[in-house]
Image: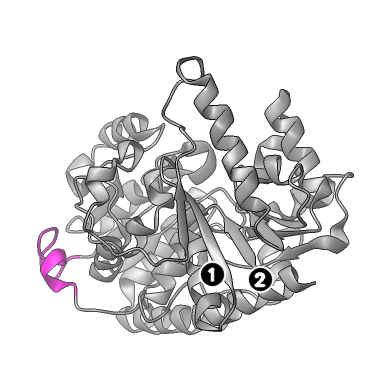
C-alpha cells in the first residue's frame, strides 16, 4: 500500500512519515514549499537562523540547512502569488497535485487538502489539527468544500482534544469514523539538556525563569490572562523573568498590557525560533506556560513536558464541570498543571516557585507521561491502523 501524507501541520506529518518509514512503510510526504515556515521540515530539523521570519521564509533561508530525504515531495502551491496575477498557474498546480494524489493507494490530507482529495477518486483520511474550530461556522465555497471533504473522508484523525465537542456537534459527520491521535513528540530530540549558557543571558543564578512559547492571540491563547497572573507573581518574585514570543495578531496588545501593569522590565521578548533553538529555551526555563483558553494542546505543551519541564496549560476547560476532553481522549489526566482563570495561573506559579523539589518531580512526571502517550512509534502505529482500515 502506497501512502501519501499531504501537508505538514506543526511538522506532525513529517514526524509521522519519518517514523512510518523506519517501520518499513511505503509512505511519502507532500510539502507545499510556500506554506507557513513552521510547517516546513527545515524548521523542525534544520539549522535555520533565528533571524528568519517564518511568515516570509524563502528558499534562500533554507538552503543548506538540512538534507531533505528522497521521500519528501516538494511543490509550490503559489500561496504568495495573488490569484489575479497567475490564475493559470494556480489552476495548473492544482491539476499537478491531483495527479500526484492518484499515484497512491490512500492519502492522509492535512489543511487544506481534504478540499481537493474528495475529487481525486482515491480513498483518503482527513487529518485535523484544529481546522474544525473554523470551517464549520463559515460561509463561502472554501468552507463548504471543506465540510464536504470531511464528510466524504473514509476516516478522520484529530490531534487536539479540545475539538472533540466540535466534532460531536457536526451532524454530517459520523463519529464512528473519527479517531483521536495525538501529536508525535520524539523524546530523544525533546529531552533535558544543559542550557545554562542561554539561561545566563536572561537571569541570575538565584532567579526564576518562566517561558511561554505560544503566539500572542488573546482569543486562542489567553496571553492577557497569563500576563496578568505574572504581574501578581512578580510582586513576590521581583528577580524573576518571563520570556514571551513576539509574534501574531495581539503582540502589541500584549506589550501594552504588560506596560500598563508596570512590569515590562521583567518581560523579555524574543522572535519565533526554529525547533532546535526552541528546545534550548524549554531547557533554560524553570516553568513553561502554554495557553489559558483551550481545553487541550498542540505541540508546545508536550514538547516542554518531554524536556522535563513543569508545564502549565488550560487542559480542563473553564469551570471543570464536565469530564475534560483531554481525559476522554487520553483515558487519564495528564500531570501538566491546569490554569484557565488568572488566580489559577498565579496559584500554580507560586506553588512551583516555592518548592524546588516539587518542580523537579513534576517535570519528571511530565516527561514520563509524554513518552507514554506521544511517542512517535505509538503515534505512527495509530496512523497506520487508521490508514489500513
- Residue, disc 2: 383
Q: Is residue 157 above or below residue 268?
A: below
Coordinates of residue 365 in the picture (x, y in percent): 47, 83
Asked which secondary structure carries label 1, the reply is helix
| Color theme of the render | one colour
Q: Residue at x 19, y 78 (%)?
A: 194
* Magenta part, dominant SS: loop
Q: Residue at x 72, y 76 (%)?
A: 385
Stretch of the chain drawn in magenta = 195-207
Coordinates of residue 363 in the picture (x, y in percent): 40, 78
Q: Is residue 95 above or below residue 164?
A: above
Q: Is residue 363 magenta?
A: no
Q: Residue at x 49, y 37 (%)?
A: 77
Task: Report the quarter where the N terminus lies.
Answer: bottom right
Marks 1 and 2 in Cβ contact (< 8 Å) = yes
Q: Callout 2: few (<14), some (14-19), or many (20+) C-alpha neighbours within 10 Å?
A: many
Is residue 267 something that shows in the picture? yes
Q: In this rendered view, identify the residue nearer to me: 7 or 336.
A: 7
Coordinates of residue 384 in the picture (x, y in percent): 67, 74
- Residue, disc 1: 16
Mark sitting on residue 69: none
Left or right, 254 with respect to 97, comes to left
Cα separation, mark 1 vs mark 2, equals: 8 Å
Coordinates of residue 268 in the picture (x, y in percent): 21, 48
Left or right, 116 with respect to 313, comes to right
Q: In this rendered view, identify the residue nearer to me: 189 or 305.
A: 189
Asked which secondary structure carries label 2, the reply is helix
Q: Earlier in the sequence, mark 1 or mark 2?
A: 1
Q: Callout 1: few (<14), some (14-19), or many (20+) C-alpha neighbours within 10 Å?
A: many
Task: Report the quarter where the C terminus lies.
Answer: bottom right
Amino acid at each position: 500500500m502506497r501512502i501519501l501524507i499531504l501537508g505538514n501541520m506543526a511538522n506532525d506529518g513529517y514526524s509521522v512519515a519519518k517514523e512510518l518509514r523506519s517501520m518499513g512503510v511505503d509512505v511519502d510526504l507532500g510539502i507545499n514549499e510556500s506554506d507557513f515556515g513552521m510547517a516546513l521540515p527545515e524548521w523542525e530539523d534544520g539549522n535555520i537562523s533565528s533571524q528568519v521570519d517564518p511568515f516570509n521564509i524563502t528558499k534562500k533561508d533554507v538552503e543548506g540547512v538540512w538534507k531533505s530525504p528522497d521521500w519528501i515531495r516538494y511543490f509550490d502551491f503559489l500561496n504568495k502569488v495573488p490569484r489575479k496575477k497567475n490564475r493559470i498557474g494556480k489552476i495548473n498546480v492544482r491539476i499537478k497535485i491531483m495527479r500526484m494524489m492518484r499515484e497512491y493507494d490512500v492519502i492522509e490530507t492535512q489543511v487544506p487538502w481534504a478540499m481537493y482529495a474528495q475529487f481525486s477518486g482515491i480513498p483518503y483520511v482527513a487529518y485535523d489539527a484544529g481546522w474544525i474550530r473554523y470551517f464549520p461556522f463559515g460561509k463561502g465555497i472554501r468552507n463548504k468544500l471543506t465540510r464536504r471533504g470531511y464528510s466524504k473522508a473514509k476516516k478522520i484523525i484529530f490531534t487536539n482534544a479540545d475539538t472533540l465537542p466540535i466534532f460531536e456537534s457536526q451532524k454530517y459527520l459520523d463519529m464512528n469514523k473519527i479517531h483521536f491521535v495525538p501529536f508525535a513528540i520524539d523524546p530523544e530530540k525533546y529531552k533535558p539538556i544543559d542550557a545554562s549558557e542561554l539561561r545566563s543571558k536572561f537571569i541570575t543564578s538565584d532567579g526564576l525563569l518562566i517561558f511561554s512559547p505560544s503566539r500572542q492571540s488573546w482569543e486562542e491563547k489567553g496571553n492577557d490572562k497569563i500576563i496578568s497572573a505574572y504581574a501578581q507573581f512578580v510582586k513576590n518574585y521581583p528577580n524573576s523573568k518571563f520570556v514571551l514570543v513576539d509574534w501574531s495578531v495581539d503582540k502589541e496588545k500584549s506589550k501594552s498590557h504588560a506596560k500598563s501593569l508596570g512590569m515590562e522590565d521583567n518581560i523579555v521578548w524574543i522572535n519565533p525560533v526554529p525547533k532546535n533553538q526552541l528546545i534550548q529555551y524549554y531547557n533554560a526555563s524553570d516553568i513553561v506556560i502554554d495557553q489559558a483558553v483551550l481545553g487541550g494542546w498542540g505541540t508546545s505543551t508536550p514538547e516542554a513536558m518531554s524536556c522535563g519541564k513543569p508545564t502549565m496549560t488550560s487542559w480542563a476547560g473553564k469551570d471543570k464541570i464536565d469530564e475534560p476532553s483531554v481525559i476522554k481522549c487520553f483515558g487519564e489526566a495528564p500531570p501538566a498543571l491546569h490554569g484557565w482563570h488568572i488566580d489559577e495561573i498565579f496559584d500554580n506559579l507560586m506553588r512551583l516557585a516555592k518548592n524546588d523539589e516539587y518542580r523537579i518531580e513534576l517535570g519528571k512526571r511530565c516527561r514520563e507521561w509524554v513518552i507514554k502517550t506521544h511517542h512517535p512509534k505509538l503515534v505512527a502505529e495509530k496512523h497506520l491502523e487508521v490508514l489500513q482500515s
